[in-house]
Image (spheres, rainbow, N blue to C red):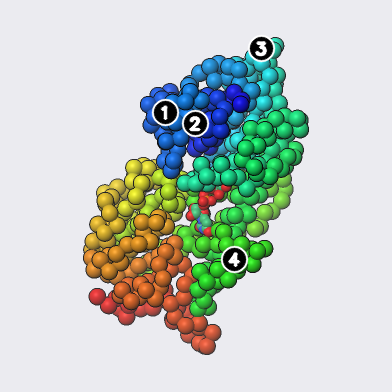
Amino acid sequence: MSVICVIGTGYVGLVTGTCLADLGNTVTCVDIVQEKIDRLNKGILPIYEPGLEEMVERNVEAGRLRFTTSYPDGLENSEFIFIAVNTPTGNNQGGADMRYVESAARSIAENLDHYAIVINKSTVPVGSGDVVSRVISNNLKSSNASFSVVSNPEFLREGAALLDFQNPDRIVLGSSEPEAAHKVARLYLQLRAPFVITDLYTAEMIKYASNAFLATKISFINEMAQICERLGADVKQVALGMGYDKRIGHAFLDAGLGYGGSCFPKDVRALAHMADEAGLHPQMLRAVMDINHDQRRLVVSKLTNMLGSLRGTTIGILGLAFKPNTDDMREAPAVDIIHWVTSQGATVRVYDPVATKTGREALERENVNLNDVAFCKTPYEVAENVDALIIVTDWNEFKSLNMQKIRGSMRRPILIDGRNVYEPSEMNRYGFIYRGMGRATTPAPSVLAAEDTTSQMPDEVNQDSLITS
Ligand code: UDX
């Protein structure tokens, strides 16, 4: 078993450090924020991730995991040093901000007094491994210090991170020193995953290309959803039918409000930026980002098409987090949607099973007037007297609601299902005016004269003819 130091106790650092301790290694997690370390030492985690709290507790008790703000303490005897600090979008048109990675590299250099392998887990622009190498070389203090750099991108999904760590599809390791990459591979041998051992640049690129491909799948199906809606097809069944083709697969073909979170938006932007900088014109990546942005707008235009002006209306919002099983609000569609509807004069009633606190903070950051937002304790409370209800996050809790009860307490029965959680026919039976994402509610308009089609599209139907209660 090995002695490991993990720099950064954010999402990736904390999950990686804790899981490596759980495999039997001795792990010290270092973070420069004293308050974060104090809280971790009391067992209070900075993030919500199912199962993580128990795993932290178990490994701290076993003496395999500890937290400190001291680099000398963290680096003592460490054979492997993971850099897992964040790389937010910088000011340079989408490029990643490397400030935290560089300062971690500098601190490692200043405190290292032996040979160690420095492993980059943060998602960094292609070529950053060289930057880390240079920063460390330029700042080494001890003559006994030496190091190798390995890139080891993470593929952890929030909400399923422990499972993803323990059952990876592959482990990617990149280095100009293959022996160093092979030593890191040994840390993961128990996980029985295939290894892709390559050079630094390629490993860094694998991470970006993987995330960009998944984001592309999502934007692709969202574009198909819009076409389905116009042509009278059902995108859920289209995706099902496509997914059985092994070359396509079922994953990441759920149409809806598009991707959010801490990775996809930032990484697609950063990759497009790198391509721009290299003198290329990444047309597909641009389209992926544009479609993703439009999906959020689409929900608001569905709403205004049905309600007319939003001024004076009350809109119910189910879900704040960017996806289920997390309280993460980064790039969450809910923030844009609430921002847009409140700026058009609506008030909102919102509920999320775990993201109330982070949701409130995110809305505040985006200058949403919190007087326009009522935070409710249940989905049923949200539905009281609202003019429309929007499902924004596909939490399991929202998949089995008593929809009759919900319908009964709404002022107007408009249900916009931003995640296609419910079946249109069932919701119609309950008396909802239901709009999903890419789920036709009228017959295919192919038989209609071209000039007549727009007036018969679901979203264009006259409000009076729809509002039945
Ligand atoms: C992602 C990658 O999956 C992970 O490998 C990487 O390391 C970090 O980024 P994460 O951001 O946690 O993980 O979320 P993920 O579960 O992949 O979903 C991303 C977004 O896409 C969510 O907003 C989700 O709602 C959306 N999504 C996903 C869809 O809209 N449709 C789908 O079919 C799948």
What residue type is disc 1 on?
Answer: Leu
Q: Is residue 96 left or right of residue 339?
A: right
Of the residues shown, which amino acid type is indicated by label 4?
Gly
Q: Which residue is mark 1?
A: 40
Q: Which residue does the numbered mark 2 point to in the structure image?
A: 9
- Mark 2 crowdedness (10 Å alpha carbons): few <14, some 14-19, many ≥20: many
- Mark 1 and mark 3 lie on one chain; the one further toward the N terminus is 1
Instruction: Say which quadrant the N terminus sits in.
Output: top right
Q: Residue furthest top?
A: 143
Disc 4 packing (10 Å; few <14; some 14–19; many ≥20): some
Query: Which of the two marks, 4 or 3, is nearer to us in this view?
Result: 4
Specify whether 107 is left or right of 45: right
Q: Nearer the viewer, mark 1 or mark 3?
A: 1
Q: Residue at x 66, y 22 (%)?
A: 116
Q: How far apart, in angstroms, are the residues tagged by discs 3 and 2? A: 26 Å
Say if mark 2 contacts mark 1, CB within 8 Å.
yes
Q: CA distance from mark 2 to mark 4?
A: 37 Å
Asked whether residue 140 is in view, the answer is yes
Q: Is residue 128 visible?
A: no
How much space separates mark 1 and mark 3, taking CA atoms? 31 Å
The circle on residue 243 is 4
Q: Earlier in the sequence, mark 4 or mark 1?
A: 1
Label 3 close to label 2 by CB (< 8 Å)? no
